[in-house]
């Protein structure tokens, strides 16, 4: 009975992974800004939450005030200014917020190399060369974050094309190339 349960659990794990929404990957800042965030913010949420917004400094201040209890936002004025300046510069109104609603659909057909290259040439090379993609090594979830972000910046990718490309990129240029 235990073996059956373990096999059933292992078979269900990939399906569970397909239904979760993609999260952005944010590179954390260094120095004083990171100290303010680490001290005041990350004990409740990650910095990837910031990427879901594109706000100016006043809107960031309003959001922080609305989302937190007054005791939670009792930052020193210098720390508050530092944080708001960084948020507005990194996630300001000129940026595009990461979509909250993308849920990867299950794919049943898979790209061949020529099909994947045709799609990349159509969707990616308007802004950068395919050689930029070839140098990267990422897991499927990381490729998905990149492609969703690129689509938000204008890459022409339907959901099924995006997922087929994620699968192909992870298979061909994934993280375990030497195995």
Image: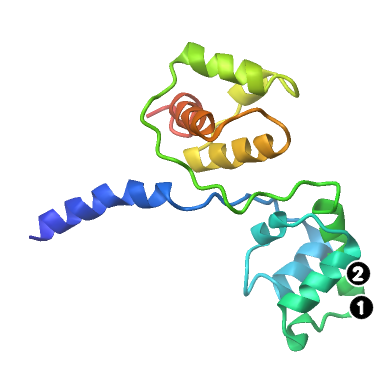
Kindly identify which residue carries mark 1: 77
Where does the image place residue 176, in percent across and percent down from the top left? Answer: 43, 33
Where does the image place residue 102, in percent across and percent down from the top left? Answer: 56, 47
Instruction: Find the residue positioned furthest to the left.
Output: 1
SS assignment at label 2:
helix
Q: Residue at x 64, y 49 (%)?
A: 99
Residue 171 quadrant? top left
Is 99 placed left or right of 20 in the picture? right
How many numbered marks, from 0 up? 2
Q: Disc number at residue 177? A: none
Tag 2 near tag 1, CB within 8 Å: yes
User: Does 108 sit above or below residue 15?
Assistant: above
Instruction: Find the residue positioned furthest to the bottom.
Output: 71
Kindly identify which residue carries mark 2: 81
| Depth check, front residue: 159 or 138 | 159
CA neighbours of label 1 inside 10 A, class few (<14), some (14 to 19), many (20+): few
Is 33 placed left or right of 1 in the picture? right
| Depth check, front residue: 32 or 101 | 101
- Rounded to the nearest whole Å, what is the CA distance between mark 2 and mark 1? 6 Å
Q: Residue at x 87, y 73 (%)?
A: 80
User: Does 153 sit above or below residue 97?
Assistant: above
Looking at the rendering, in which quadrant would you find the N terminus? bottom left
Where does the image place residue 90, in percent across and percent down from the top left? Answer: 81, 52
CA neighbours of label 2 inside 10 A, class few (<14), some (14 to 19), many (20+): some
Q: Residue at x 56, y 31 (%)?
A: 158
User: Does 69 sit above or below residue 25?
Assistant: below
Where does the image place residue 153, in percent across and percent down from the top left? Answer: 73, 36
| Depth check, front residue: 32 or 99 | 99
């Amino acid at each position: 009975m235990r073996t059956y349960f373990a096999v059933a659990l292992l078979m269900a794990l990939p399906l569970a992974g397909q239904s979760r929404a993609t999260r952005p990957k944010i590179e954390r800042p260094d120095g004083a800004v990171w100290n303010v965030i680490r001290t005041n913010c990350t004990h409740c949420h990650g910095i990837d939450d910031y990427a879901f917004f594109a706000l100016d400094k006043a809107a960031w201040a309003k959001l922080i005030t609305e989302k937190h209890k007054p005791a939670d936002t009792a930052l020193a004025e210098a720390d508050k200014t530092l944080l708001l300046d960084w948020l507005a510069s990194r996630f300001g109104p000129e940026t595009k917020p990461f979509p909250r609603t993308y849920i990867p659909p299950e794919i049943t057909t898979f790209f061949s190399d020529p099909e994947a290259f045709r799609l990349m040439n159509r969707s990616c090379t308007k802004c950068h060369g395919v050689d930029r993609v070839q140098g990267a090594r990422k897991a499927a979830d990381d490729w998905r974050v990149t492609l969703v972000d690129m689509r938000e910046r204008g890459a022409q990718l339907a959901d099924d094309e995006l997922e087929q490309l994620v699968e192909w990129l992870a298979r061909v240029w994934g993280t375990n190339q030497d195995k």
